[in-house]
Image (tube, helix red, strand yellow):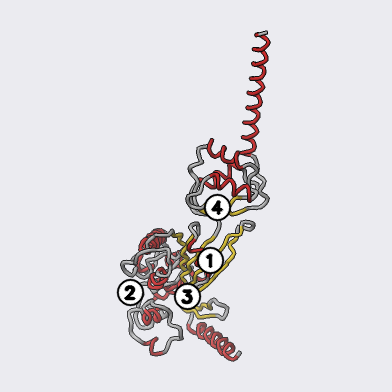
Amino acid sequence: MWKALASNALTFLVVLLFLAGGVILWGQQSYQSAGPLEAPICVRVASGSNMSRVSSQLEQDGAISNGSLFRIGADYSGKSDQLKAGAFLVPDGASMEEIVDILTRGGASTCGTEVVYRIGVTRSQILVRELDPATSRFVETANFNPAAEDTPAEFTTAAERGDTRHRIAMAEGVTSWQVVESLKSVGVLTGEVADLPAEGSLAPDSYEVNRGDTRQSVIDRMQDAQASILASAWANRVEGLPLETPEEALILASIIEKETGVAEERRTVGSVFINRLNRGMRLQTDPTVIYGITKGQGTLGRGLRQSELRGETPWNTYVIDALPPTPIANPGRASIEAALDPASTNFVFFVADGTGGHAFAETLAEHNRNVAKWRAIEAERSNN
């Protein structure tokens, strides 16, 4: 009798172990297999949240089929206490294991709301954008000029949300004064800029910032980036340039930046100024005259007068014989590289051609014909 009981108990234990092993295997496969999510979603994790709340949210969103299994898997992998606050893009078909990794690996939010502070040449803008998980593209929900328009509710809501990403987008050709003034309207930043950065020393680019960052720290990042770009371009410069220092290259790059908005023209425009410097010709470029008037503090907002073209300022290249003493804006990488690796041409003149680009010429006679064509285009436009 005792032998029978022992045999039955052993059999029962084996069955239990077999079933337990099957459950574990099933749980492991379910945790690692593709999930039920049919389309990408943005999962927001509030500060102070936990796996229990997140698993309930994921079940409700249809991203996982079993919240208990999700929590067990996160606990077993040692990630239960590594949950990160933010907004995270979860792709369709993501397994529970993949979702746990997405929500615990850290880093910046990968979806949700983004506020972009655009620093432009003629004006600054604040954009509020929301990522559409289905297309992975941002949808603009608000766009306004902080200096001239009322603050929309979408911006107020986004600015208060903890998982909103904030980014400063600095355009090529803005001045250091414009950057400092624009940073004052970025409410998530703190502190003041100690001194106005040297003209040309800031790299136009996109900079992600966090709430509480100082404005000076953003300026420092911009200056470090520009110094690195200039050092690399100077090290790779072509031979025979009439530029003695990286600072002179930065000055020329800023002029190229202000003279053309057409990317394909930068190296050709650079060649014109390099040829003029090599021949001892004055650069005769309007943007330098404008900088001598405004000192980079805003835009002129009108055409230049003949008296201003003749007016003596350190930046007026119609009067001075060489480069001005400082850059006239903050040039981008492409303009810096154009100054140090210009196209090989014999051009010494250029004028607008009516398409947004320029007509280039080697001789004054050819240039005068191009100017006449441009004047005709201007006259026709003014009559329409």
Q: Residue at x 38, y 73 (%)?
A: 177
Comparing marks 4 and 3, which lies closer to the viewer?
Answer: 4
For the residue labelled by badge 2, is the local secondary structure a helix, a strand or a loop?
A: loop
**222 is higher (above) or lower (below) than 288:** above
Quadrant of residue 71 within the rendered picture: top right
Residue ID for mark 3: 123
Residue ID for mark 2: 325
Comparing marks 4 and 2, which lies closer to the viewer?
Answer: 4
**159 is higher (above) or lower (below) than 53:** below
The x, y position of residue 263, in whole percent, is 52, 69
Q: Is residue 175 left or right of residue 131?
A: left
| Amino acid bearing label 3 | Arg
Indicate which disc residue 268 carries.
Answer: none
Residue ID for mark 1: 128
Marks 4 and 2, the one that precedes in the sequence: 4
| Amino acid bearing label 1 | Val
Indicate which disc residue 88 carries.
Answer: 4
The x, y position of residue 159, in whole percent, is 48, 64
For the residue labelled by badge 1, is the local secondary structure a helix, a strand or a loop?
A: strand
Count of number-bearing discs: 4
For the residue labelled by badge 4, is the local secondary structure a helix, a strand or a loop?
A: strand
Q: Residue at x 68, y 8 (%)?
A: 1
The x, y position of residue 99, in whole percent, is 58, 45
Residue 148 in view, yes or no: yes
| Amino acid bearing label 4 | Phe
Q: Residue at x 63, y 45 (%)?
A: 64
Rounded to the nearest angstrom, the CA distance separating label 3 from label 1 is: 17 Å
Rounded to the nearest angstrom, the CA distance separating label 4 from label 2 is: 49 Å
Rounded to the nearest angstrom, the CA distance separating label 1 from label 2 is: 39 Å
Marks 4 and 3, the one that precedes in the sequence: 4
Q: Nearer the viewer, residue 23 or 33?
A: 23
